[in-house]
Amino acid sequence: MNPKSRILGLLRKKVLILDGAMGTELHKRGLPPGVCPEAWSLANPAAVGDIHGAYREAGADVVYTSTFGANRLKMGQYGLTNVGETNRLLAEIATRAAGRGLVAGDIGPTGHFVEPFGDVPFDEAVAVFREQAQGLLEGGVDLFVIETMMDIQEARAALIAVREVCDLFCMVTMTYEKHGRTLNGTDPVSALVTLQSLGADAVGCNCSAGPEGMLGLIAAMRPHATVPLVAKPNAGLPTLVGEDTVFDMDAARFAGFAAPLAAAGVNLMGGCCGTTPAHIRALRDSLVDVKPVAPDRHAAPAASSARNAVILREGGPLAVIGGRLDAAGDETLREGLLAGDFGPIRQAVRAQEKEGAQMLLLKAGGAGLDETRVTRELLEQIAPTTRSTFLLVADKVETVAQALRFYPGRLLVGVDGADAASVLPVVAQYGAVPVLSIPAQGGRAAIRRAAADARKHGFAREGMIIDCTPAQINPATLREAVAMIAWCEKSLRCRTLMNFTRVGQGLPEQPWLQAGLLAAAQAAGLTLAVIDPAVAEPMRIRAAGDWLRLGGDSFSSGRT
């Protein structure tokens, strides 16, 4: 049985026990302050093997290699360059000590933020982590753990790197501040949506807080998790005693949170800073009779930026996609992009968010524009500061591939029927949400064919969106579009989208025509509407429709 199948089989039967802290155990065995832990571990293999063995004896199903900082950037601070060999040798130490237990190749942060949030180029970060992952793989690890990540983009780079070298089970755990976000602002749900869609086999949190504080983070993720959840809390909160950082939660008190964490949905559980083999033994004993709570493989589809997730619930509120970032339809925007002036674009992003948009249309193609380059530049400029994610509409497959690889979240991607064969594999590779456009006169048969093609690439029906916008805008086609929305909702169980920006174009009654059509489409079950959120009439109709559908004492158009 291969390691991934073994892990998945174990997760169906029990909560897997992870090991505890490595750094504090190394210091107990003589690691001096200021010395590279990985270099010291190589020089003292017996001490490192003893730590692994102690955790296995305590009941850990999975032990982590002593490679938390064994990447080119971290090791370079100590003048060390033997990255691949270091990871391979430390993995071999762990595999010998673990016996029949599982060994996770441990990948920690570089100590830098990755673009668009920092100074490390994204593809360079991927290369750094790929080098480490390759060494760990050669050392015989059974799975990978990417842990203590504070930058969602760095976590994405590490996950892509692992996926470029193997298909082993890979879990990713972020670390969160007291306010419930990472250091650069990512909340647990956004991280979960981004990472599980990108291919993480398990997602969760480590370090961050004690087990009590971690309960809230897990509870936030659980309703949206399609993969197992991971918790590796500290032994309480740190206090400074003299020059030493002390974690004062003893093993019994720590293990008292095991059952509540498992009930909240944790499937893999261990300890981080301050925990010892005694904590892991107590954890194991507390979970002997606890059955795992399986993740919901059919959670609602979602999109996310680095700072916010939009959950597309069946029967939920209508999501608004601001439609003003369309270079093909806006000459002023196109000229600004040609001149490299992103100021007006930033203003348009902020304005649409303030007006009530949860997502934004992004279409950077147009006469004279290098679509691939301009799309990348736009994302570099606006992704770090916006809460909104994007519906990306592009003419070139290269544009889609580069944007999905780089974007620090989960995008919606327009997939035209003629280009589906080349675009869908890229959308699937990076875990984006496909928005399937239907050819003119295609009808329901064309929708079924498009949905069937998407399913061949691994997309569930509830995980795709059907664009019901008609090619020709007239009363007959609009009535048919509304009927199509209802049919997609009831028969296919797919989410739906409609673009209202061309409806009533040039007519003085345009706002009310859009509002009337929106009301009909929303009543039919529409999921997403591309509109200009500055136009009051459709925004107020949308708010009223949500109030009628969802109930409530008052309603708001979303405008502030």
Image (cartoon, helix red, strand yellow):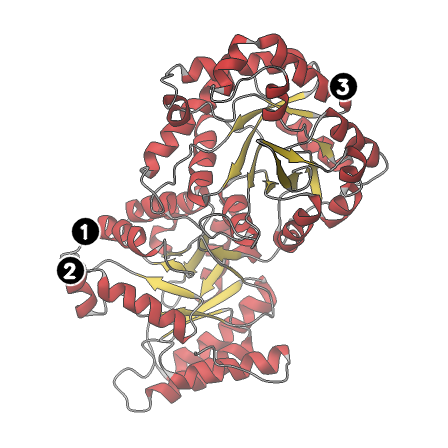
Q: Which residue is mark 1?
A: 370
Residue 2 visible within the image? no
Of labels 1 and 3, the one closer to you: 3
Between 28 and 378, the one lying in front of the other is: 28
Between 520 and 483, the one lying in front of the other is: 520
Q: Which residue is mark 3?
A: 57
Q: Earlier in the sequence, mark 1 or mark 3?
A: 3
**SS class, disc 1:** loop
Between 233 and 325, the one lying in front of the other is: 233
Image position, residue 336 (x, y; %) = 17, 63
Of labels 3 and 2, the one closer to you: 3
Q: Tags 1 and 3 in contact by the CB under 8 Å rule?
A: no
Direction from residue 244 to residue 119 in the image, left or right: left
Instruction: Tell me which amino acid carries mark 2.
Output: Ala
Image: 201 above or below 2: below
Mark 1 neighbour class, 10 Å CA radius: few under 14, some 14 to 19, many 20 or more: some
The residue lying at 30 percent from left, 50 percent from top is 380
Image: 167 above or below 186: above
Direction from residue 80 to residue 490 in the image, left or right: right
The residue lying at 37 percent from left, 33 percent from top is 125
Image position, residue 154 (x, y; %) = 43, 39
Q: Residue furthest right?
A: 289
Mark 3 neighbour class, 10 Å CA radius: few under 14, some 14 to 19, many 20 or more: some
Q: Residue furthest front?
A: 242
Instruction: Tell me which amino acid carries mark 3.
Output: Glu
**SS class, disc 2:** loop
Image position, residue 475 (x, y; %) = 38, 84
Q: Which dot marks residue 367?
A: 2
Mark 2 neighbour class, 10 Å CA radius: few under 14, some 14 to 19, many 20 or more: few
Q: Within the image, what quadrant is residue 342 found in?
A: bottom left
Image position, residue 533 (x, y; %) = 38, 76
